[in-house]
Amino acid sequence: MAAAAAKSGSSPLKLVLLVVAWYAGNTMYNVYNKKAANMIHAHWFVAAAQLVVGMVWSVTMWATGLRKKPNLTAADITACIPIGLMACISHAGSVLAMGMGAVSFAQIVKACEPVFAAVVGLIVPPMDVKPMLAYAMLIPIIGGVGLACIKEGKGVDINVAAFGYASLANLAAALKGKLGGSVTKALKGDKSKNMDSANVYAVMNFISFFFTVPMVVIAEGSTLKEEWDHACEEHGAQALITNIALSGFFFYVYNEFAFAFTAQVGAVTSSVLNTAKRVIIIVVSSVMFMEPMTKNTVMGSAIAIIGTFGYSLASKAKAAPKKKTS
């Protein structure tokens, strides 16, 4: 952390506080998101409502002058639309995965994100070829997730729906990173657009919401009122609204701190700490929601997370300079 601080010019204390806020916010988001998803079986609606909380936060910051408003052209917004769509799918996929299965299991599957990122990097132009060591690290990631899905005495035993949605979230996250790199870099580079890391995330949050709403109507529109009334009757409206609101608040806050940290130290350090973050979430969720962790689950998740850690380091390793021949 000290090396990262020296490189970025930020104080070590500031970076530590950013990491603490990021980890705490992410952990609390997973807790309240699971509580909300357990209360109401309308997970697209929960995902949309969480985005609304972030939108209100952003508008408040802009209206009070605490943060400069984005100054975007129609062309800028158009360029951001594909990224916002991928953000929508990534967020909703995660919410649906954790709603239909254990939080710990969703986090283990999401450790496979580097696999999707590696494939997307090869097939979506411009091609991004990683060092061979990075590709080698995909083996323990896939193997670890596979081991975590094997239950003693039962063989392969997975929640297919949760696995599918978590994998969809991984694919969307990989595409978001691939499609968004050049766009967000250009927006941040033009000071007149007021697009710092916080505003980039806020704009993507708005676009993501506008893509999520149609899915709420299509997937849950006919049953939403019935599901809401049932959830309020069983759990109480106040508890339901509180859990949705807090999950939305922590979702926005942890992402904003994560964006701010990455802007300070770069993608490598951020990726490494993002990997470590999953350990905390798996442990906390297992304790809070009494999610069983078998020996294979523990070993598999550990192997996958170590593989992700190695991939994060190896994928950004610089090739050794070639020696000049005399």
Image: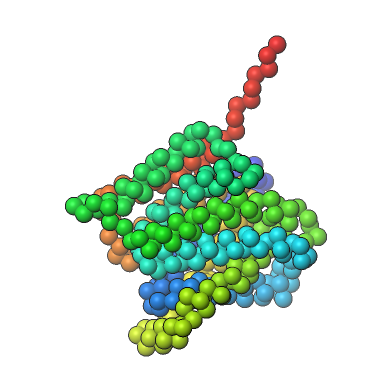
Q: Which residue is at a point 41% across and 40% down the rendered structure image?
A: 139
Residue furthest right as drawn: 192
Residue furthest top as drawn: 326
Q: Which residue is at a point 41% across and 83% down the rendered structure image?
A: 227
Q: How many labels does the image show?
A: 0
Residue furthest left as drawn: 153
Q: Is residue 325 depicted above or below 235 in this figure?
A: above
Location of the C terminus (image quadrant) = top right
Q: Which residue is at a point 40% across and 76% down the rendered structure image?
A: 41
Location of the N terminus (image quadrant) = top right
Q: Which image quadrant is residue 225 in? A: bottom left
Q: Is residue 3 depicted above or below 80 in this figure?
A: above
Q: Where is residue 282 in the image (x, y as percent from the top left)?
A: 38, 57
Colouring of the image: rainbow
Give the camera-side residue of 278 and 184: 184
Q: Can residue 246 be seen in this view?
A: no
Q: Where is residue 248 in the image (x, y as percent from the top left)?
A: 52, 71
Q: Where is residue 127 in the image (x, y as percent from the top left)?
A: 61, 41
Give the camera-side residue of 207 and 55: 207
Give the camera-side residue of 304 and 269: 304
Q: Which residue is at a point 35% across and 85% down the rendered structure image?
A: 234
Q: Where is residue 286 in the image (x, y as percent from the top left)?
A: 33, 61
Q: In this view, does 206 lie to the left or right of 250?
A: right
Q: In this view, does 76 lie to the left or right of 263?
A: right
Q: Is residue 175 visible?
A: yes
